Structure formats: structure tokens, C-alpha cells
Amino acid sequence: MTKDATLPVPPIYRGPLPQAVPAAGGTIERVPVTVYEQPGEASRAVAREIAELITERKRAGRKTVLGLATGSTPVGVYDELIRLHRHEGLSLASVVSFNLDEYWPMAPDALQSYHRFMREHLFDHVDVPADQIHIPDGTLERSAVAAACQHYEEAIREAGGIDLQILGIGRTGHIGFNEPGSAIDSRTRLITLDSVTRSDAASDFFGEWNVPRQAITMGVGSILDARRIVLLAFGEHKASIVRRAVEEPFNNHVSASALQQHPDARFVLDRAAAGRLTRFEAPWLVGPLDLLGIHWTDELVRKAVISLALRLGKPLLKLTDGDYNEHGLQDLLSKRGRAYDININVFRVMQGTITGWPGGKPGRARRIRRPVGSGPFDSQPVQDVVREIVAEEDPFPKRVVVFSPHPDDDVISMGGTFIRLCEQGHEVHVAYQTSGNIAVWDESADRHVDFVEEFCRAFSEGKAVGTVAERIRAFLRNKEPGAVDIPELQTVKGLIRRSEARAAALLSGVKAERIHFLDLPFYETGRVRKKPIGPDDIAVTMRLLEAVKPHQIYAAGDLSDPHGTHRVCLAAVLGAMKELADRDWARSCEIWLYRGAWQEWEPHEIDMAVPLSPDEVVRKRMAIFKHESQKDRALFPGPTDPREFWQRAEDRNRDTARLYDKLGLPEYEAIEGFVLHRVS
Ligand code: F6R
């Protein structure tokens, strides 16, 4: 399987892709599912499928009717169609298209309009004739909507029905905007958006209150009329809803589960979105692993045993043969002999992850105790489940670079470890990868401009500042929600985040000259949607790494941050390290991945667990508090998670500590977990 060049391989899912197989009592997956390593690969395959359909039908002298979606998911498919059009002679002149939906009300030129989206992402770059393009009209009067919806349905019928429907899936399980409760035979209509959908769209509209309450959408019934349906889903944040749509019996709480009723519907996923399917999450429950084409790797053993302990509410060392046998782990037990041996091995691995010295102890060889990664070990003796990697030369103090995608991820996700590394005498550098300027409210920027003006007036330095301040104020007076800020305002917002980041890093113990602001170019669009990663992003990152020559790197390893910034930032670090792979320092450099802003590592994934004392928890909180401009950003996740960042971070760290405690390991106040990046 090829790997997407632009993004790193997600660190959590290793080993081969388990195949879907029938479980003892039937099939767990109720609709065909294809899983690709990376979204890019999946998108290219679907684009090829569309291209083949167009070519095939053209040969038969027929048009191709496509049902199209918007959102972040299908962008890769559209990019590939554009490439095929430009470089491989694919004509889309015979395509008739029907888009799923449009916000209502919505002007077609507005930033968030699906008319504009389709022009920018596809239609401006290919040759679909304008009169063959159909998108619901967001400008209609309310009284005209119902008739227009009926007309839309008729137009689809007149075109001969949809040959291939592309779908994404929302976190509510919606397809189109068919929110929970949509009937299986619903048709094109006006619908009120679910609060989760509105909060997911909040950043596109620069505030949930700007998100329209309604939308026009094709119905579930209209979608099911298509002859073939492909639903795409990428990213960990889609994993739970994908599982519900694929494995739970059809129900109208999850509209996407209606695809189970269609004779030719398919889910196309990347590994992250497939991660909660039972064949990945708990393959031993699907059937004998041999049938799935996977082996009992040490990581899988750890996962199975920990989930058994947590499910039964027992510490690891108290699990019995009976527990294994009665809860789907007969296969593991029969291969390993005794529960006692398996328990103790997993216990030791978990115990070995705990260290209060993330950079190692002075004068001591460091022992990183961790499983060896992928690879079958069914035939190996039990003791080999755990291997010790003993670094022979373990320098102390270490040079450390903490990469922080946004200016607050360092303290939110690894604030305690950050403080420890500084206190334990390491040379700690922090590199803020993006300016984070789009996450600053206008009011906050305005207040700072006001402060600077007052400051300059007080010291008779006001003139130039006054001009900039006036320009910013004039812009803010007429700013439309979601409009791109003028450069001066973007700069002010970036500076606010810089000064907050500096304050938080200094509080954590970093020396001022070791604070670096990279301002990676991919981020600087002034919009939520970013540019793809480019050579400049890698070059900036390489320059810093070459200058510091770190022994340890810490980087954000989350795959579900809403706008993909963390993923791109990780790709920049890994891309730079790849370029520098032949340097002496790089060969022994460890890359530790942290999480925390959006979700946490699961206990079986953790390779290093750094405990936090109650005092350290408070100090970490103080560092997060320095990010004042982000305080009310916590409203952004909307009603789904109204907690502030510091609360979410603390809850996660406490949860990890609680999990360790439940497994029978020492009881700490809080734990920050890390995964060692493995080059696969
Ligand atoms: C878009 C649409 C929606 C999206 C879904 C996922 O036309 O109808 O159902 O497909 O909300 O959105 P993304 O792809 O942005 O996660």
C-alpha cells in the first residue's frame, strides 16, 4: 500500500489492515467498507472511479449524473479530478451535477456558501457546463423554498437520476444536512441544523452565532435513489460516528446508517476514521485473528488485556483464565498459556512507562521500556512480549525542542513535562509553529490596539501608531462575519498570541532566547482553511533543528484537531527530520508525540507516562491562564464541550492517572502520556 506523501502515518494504527469478515453470528459491518492508509490515497481512488464512470458512459453516448458534497472531506477527490482534467485529458463536459445542500439563507458569493465552495474547489478548474450544475438556492424567500425543493427533485429525475453520489458524514451522522430524526424516505427540503453541526461550522463562520440555523438539503430518500453511493470519512473525529453508521442496525438517529439499505453503497475511510470499527478496536471480538489476517502483536495484547481489565473493573494482576475465556480472549489465552503470565507482562510494560524524568536521570543509562512495535510474535516465548531498550549513552542534560502547533499547545498538552524538563536542567527550546492569529477575537485585538495607543500617547510616541489604529478600527467597523482581516489586524492578533506564549513559556522555566516563533507559511491565509504544507514550512523547521541539534523532540500527535493544523505541523517536523536523517544527532534523536488539546492517548498506546503532583497541576494551570485571548475561545466547541482548555487538559490528565490506578499501578494526581514515534 502506498503512503500519502504529505501527511505522516498515524502513529496509533500499525500493522496490516484487518479485513472485514463475518462474525460468528453474522456480519459486524452492515455495509461494505474500504479502508486506506491515508486520505490522499482514498481520494485518488474515488476520483479514478468517477473518471472511469464518466469515460464509460461517454463511450455509450450518455451523460454522467453526479451527486456532489462540500465540506473538507471531498476536497481531495476534487483536486484529483482537476489534475486528471489538466494533465490526463479527462473532460467533465458530459457531467450533470447536483449538490446535496446549501445553507439557508446564504448569498452565493458569501465565504461560506456552497456555491462559492464548488466554484473554488472544482467548477472554476474543469469544463462542466454551467447549465449542467445544480446547487440548492440559499437566496430564496422562505415561501418559495418548498416549490424549489420539489423542482430540484424533478430536475434530478429528468436528468435520469444520480449515477454516483458522493457523501461526507457529519458528527451527528448526517448525510447532506439530514440531521438525526430524518426519515428514510425524506426528500429535498428545508431543515433546521443540529446544534452539533452548527458548532462544527462555528469556525467557518467566525462564531457559532453567525451560523445559519437552517439549510436546504436533499433528503435521505433522494440520496438512496442514487444508483451508487460512496461515503468518504477521514480523521479520528469521525471514527465514533462511522462505527455507529456501519455497525449499529439502521436507525434514523444516524442518517448515514440508511446506506445499509442500499444495494450499492460503500464507506471509504482512512485508518483514523476506521479506528473505532470493531475490526480495529477489538478485532478479537470479530473472530479468530488468523481469519482477519492479523497477529497478536504485543501492542494488540496490551490493548486487549487493558480493555478486559477496565471492562471488568479489575486490576491487571487479578484477571483470571476465566475472565479471558469468557470475554472473547480464548484465542490469546490458548496461544499464551496462562492469564498470570500475560497479566504480569502487560503490568510490567505499563509500569515501565512511568517516569518522573522524561529526559533521563543524570549519570544513569536510561531504560525505555516499551513493546517492540509491530510484527507477529505468536511463536515467541512469553518473556519477549516486553523488551527493554537500554540506551547505552544517555547524555545529560539534553537539548530538547518542544514543537507547539498553536501558541498554547505546549502548556495545554504537556505543561507538566515541560516544567519538569526545565527544572531538571535540560536545554529546553520551544518552537511555536504557527502564529495562531485567526483564533483571536476582534474585541481582544481592539483592546490591545487601545492599550498601545494609550502607551504611546503617555510616552509621546503616538503618531504612526495612531494611523495603524485608525485603519484597524475603520476595518472593524464594517467587518462582515468571517471576512479575512487586513494585514495590520492579523499582525496584532499574532502579536497577542506571541506575548501570551512567551509569558507561559517563561513561567514554565524556558529561557527567553530559547523561545522561537516559526510562523510557518502554510497557516498564514487569514482563514480557517489553510494552504497545504510546502517546502518553505519544512525549510523553516529544518533551520531550527539544525541550529539546536536536539536529543529529544516533543511534537503534537493528534489526528483530530478540527482544522488539521496539528496534522500539518507534525508533517513539517517529520518532513524536516527525514531531510536531516543522516546527521549524527538526528540518528539518535527521540521524537515523543503528545496529545491533549482534543483527545488523549489511550493507555495501551502510552510509551512514557509522566506523573504530575498536585502542585505541578496548579503550575500547569497558571501557564495555560497566560493565554488570556483563548479563554473564551472555549465557547467554540459549543454545547458539546463547554469546558475551558485548562479544564479539559486537567480532566484528561486526571483520567489517565485514574486509568493507571484502576489497572493496579500507582495512584497519581495526574499523568501526561507520550507515544514514541516509530518510523514505519
Ligand atoms: C456537505 C454535506 C455534509 C458534509 C458533512 C461532513 O455538502 O452535506 O453532510 O459532508 O458535514 O463535513 P466535513 O467533510 O467538512 O467533515
Image: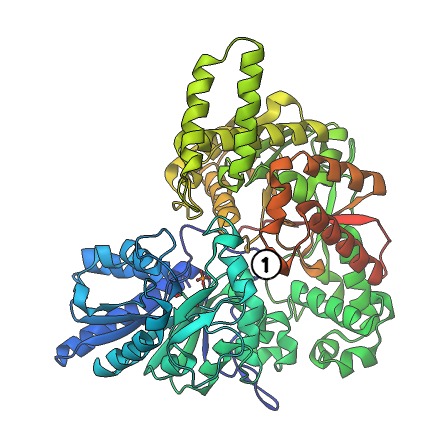
For the point 84% across and 43% down, the residue is 614
Q: SS at mark 1?
A: loop
Q: Nearer the viewer, residue 339 or 216?
A: 216
Q: Nearer the viewer, residue 543 or 454?
A: 454
Looking at numbered disc 1 in the image, what kind of residue is underneath it?
A: Ile
* Displayed quadrant of residue 302: bottom right
Return the x and y of residue 663 as percentages of the image width and height.
82, 62
Can residue 248 be seen in this snapshot?
A: yes
Left or right? Give the position of 157 relative to 114: left
Return the x and y of residue 508 as percentages of the image width and height.
71, 31
Can residue 562 be seen in this snapshot?
A: no
Q: Nearer the viewer, residue 186 or 477?
A: 477
For the point 53% across and 75% down, the residue is 180
The residue tagged 1 is 12
Return the x and y of residue 203 as percentages of the image width and height.
49, 51
Left or right? Give the position of 607 relative to 570: right
